[in-house]
Image: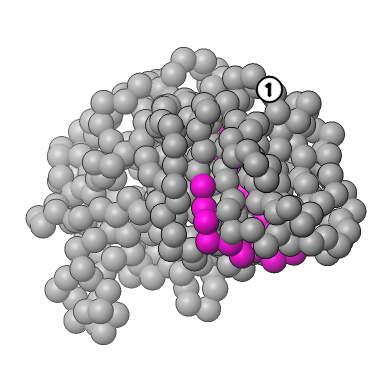
Amino acid sequence: MALQIWLPLDNTIKNQGIFTEVPESSNINIKSINGVPMTYFNNSYIKFSTGGYFNKEFSFSFWIYVDSLDTYSLWNWRDTAGGSIAVFIIDEQFRLDDGNQHEFSYIIPTKTLLHVALTRDASYCKLYVNGELKQSIASTDFTLPTNKIASIGCSSTKSNFGLNYLSGYLRDYRVYNHCLSASEVVELSKGLYYHYPLNQPEKDTTSELSRKGYDEIEYDVSGSINNISLISGLIPEWSSDTPKYLGCYNYNTAGNIISTTNHIKPTRNVSISAWVKATSIESVTEPSVDVDGINIYVNNAGVIHLVGTFGDLNSSVSCIDTWCYVVGTYDGTTVKLYVNGELKASKAYTSDLQYIKGAAISSDSKSGISCKVSDFRVYLSALTESKIKDMYSVSTKVSSNSMLLTNEIVE
């Protein structure tokens, strides 16, 4: 699988795909939807001039939000000889044009954040929305364009560039020289934004792995490049005890913390997950709790909670001497807490999450709790129960390099 074009469109249009070209852009702006930065298009475009973007099997993946519907161009690559690859919104529906017009019947909702994937192979053109297959249409052979110009946000003819301007928002725009599988589309639809394995070996260990691996940076492997520089004296102890990967962080000293200043503040449609294991309880002092945002929290009895702007959800599950997979979600109407793939608590809530601090994993200065943490993630979507169950069921199925879970995508 080759990721040809990858534009985060959260604060940059830098292409992180195989193409090294920096695209031309005009009149684009960064705005926020549900607390998440997206690129706003209004008489705007992003233009490439390399050519040869993909072959006759390809895929598009992006997040989109529109206030109203008209004829909009989401991708345009065509020539005067009849070669064409274009993606449109027309009559409230998506259309994939490869010389043949594949019109999908799904009606696009307005004022709704959607993950969309359009895939094509020799047999079918498919539309997925939020990870679900909506329609398959038989594909036929076509002629690839020879023109080098391709654009996002507007279309063109032989004599006129700048038609069918998109009025709306895009984020995480990807073009693959490959037909994505259904499982790959599901992974992309989760909207993974932070992913810290928390397996960086400590500096003074003597193993060959530790000497090669330690560089005082906690790498974000989501692809969003939110790497964290670890602060000397506050770095948690590395432990080989882990539910997966090659280790975990043991928060056994007051004030242990890793945090990022390059943080987003999703007000809704967000999920947070981690593996946790409490190993000792040495104090009756209840840990302090940040009441902003959304937080996984282990109390002084080793019981897992989800706390934040919405209050406190108690799972009634202890993680003392047991690794537990914890997920908290908020979809704008309900906050939910899952442990080991099972829903343990929920609460109706319709207000925006409010934030004071950024993303952090830390130990309280008073509690005396020792807790191990592994595989911390933030998703810009409210994960469904079925996805959470699937993630838990494959959580210990790693590849031969012990770094990737089953079906995970690392670009």
Q: Which residues are magenta?
A: 47-64
Residue 357, by quadrant, is top left
- Residue 334 percent across, percent down from the top left: 56, 23
Q: In terms of depth relative to the viewer, which is nearer, 216 or 70? A: 70
Q: Residue at x 31, y 39 (%)?
A: 263
Using residue 254 as the reference point, say whether residue 46 is left or right of it: right
Q: Secondary structure at mark 1?
A: loop
Task: Give the amino acid at mark 1.
Answer: Leu
Q: Residue at x 70, y 54 (%)?
A: 79
Using residue 378 as the reference point, say whether residue 5 is left or right of it: right
Furthest residue toward bottom: 208
Q: Residue at x 77, y 40 (%)?
A: 95
Q: In terms of depth relative to the viewer, which is nearer, 355 or 282? A: 355
Q: Is residue 48 magenta?
A: yes
Using residue 171 as the reference point, say whether residue 388 is left or right of it: right
Is 195 placed above or below 315 here? Answer: below
Residue at the disc numbered 1: 69
Q: In terms of depth relative to the viewer, which is nearer, 242 or 317? A: 242
Residue 310 makes an appearance in the image: yes
Furthest residue toward front: 159
- Quarter of the image with the N terminus is bottom right
- Residue 283 percent across, percent down from the top left: 20, 40
Residue 329 makes an appearance in the image: no
- Residue 293 percent across, percent down from the top left: 36, 28
Using residue 222 as the reference point, say whether residue 336 is left or right of it: right
